[in-house]
Image (spheres, rainbow, N blue to C red):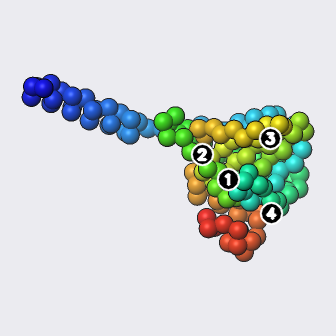
Amino acid sequence: MNRKKLIQMIASLVLLCLVMTGCKRETFSYSLRQDQSNIDKVEICTYDHDTGMRSVLVELSDRDSNELLSAISNLECHKSFPLEPILSYGDVVICITYFDGEVEMIGIYNIGWITSNGDLNTTLYYFNIQDIRKLIARYVDPDILAEVSEEF
């Protein structure tokens, strides 16, 4: 390969890397999968990604549920690149259960849902880790969070 082509190829690769890593990721307001009137309950749970098991830490009252959902709508949501999907939710998640059995999961690292048939689905969406931690910590005793998660 001659020197000119090698330099062009290296320059192209550098430019491609700059474009892929230097792009500003736009933020947006997250919308729930279903209308708020379809919500049966809102819980904060521990979550084991390997087994899919969830254990309820707290079930929120209607007032707290509305407050939490309002706070979620005010958080900046981000979209990861499809080449680097985030597959883990973290060990504490916000679970929004709808009347049809679907469960929307908002984790520390990722957002997804479980179908009424039990199939787990992930999205490319996520919130700032510190923001979602603070939100969860409003509703769960800090001592309990420290016992069940290294994130708190």
Nearest the camera: 38 or 87?
87
Horizontally, residue 23 falls left or right of residue 114, namely left
Could you give the CA–CA distance between mark 1 and mark 2, rounded to whole angstroms?
9 Å
Q: Secondary structure at mark 1?
A: loop
Q: Amino acid at mark 3?
A: Gly
Amino acid at the residue labelled 2: Leu
> Cα distance, mark 3 to mark 1?
14 Å
Please rate how many residues cluster around mark 3, counting C-alpha atoms within 10 Å: few if below 14, some from 14 to 19, many from 20.
Answer: few
Check disc 3 and report the residue beneath it. 118
**Secondary structure state at the residue bearing disc 3:** loop
Dot 2, crowdedness within 10 Å: few (<14), some or many (≥20)?
some
Query: Who comes first in sequence, dot 1 or dot 2?
Result: 1
Q: Is 40 located above or below residue 47 in the figure?
A: above
Is the Cβ of the residue at disc 4 closer than 8 Å to that at disc 3?
A: no
Identify residue for label 1.
Answer: 49
Amino acid identity at mark 4: Leu
Compared with residue 24, is residue 70 higher up or lower down, i.e. above or below? below
How far apart, in angstroms, are the residues tagged by discs 1 and 4?
A: 16 Å
The residue that mark 4 highlights is: 57
The front one of 122 and 69 is 122
Gap in angstroms between the C-alphas marked 4 and 3: 21 Å
Circle nearer the N terminus (3, 2):
2
Mark 4 secondary-structure assignment? strand
Please provide percent x and percent y for residue 68: 76, 52
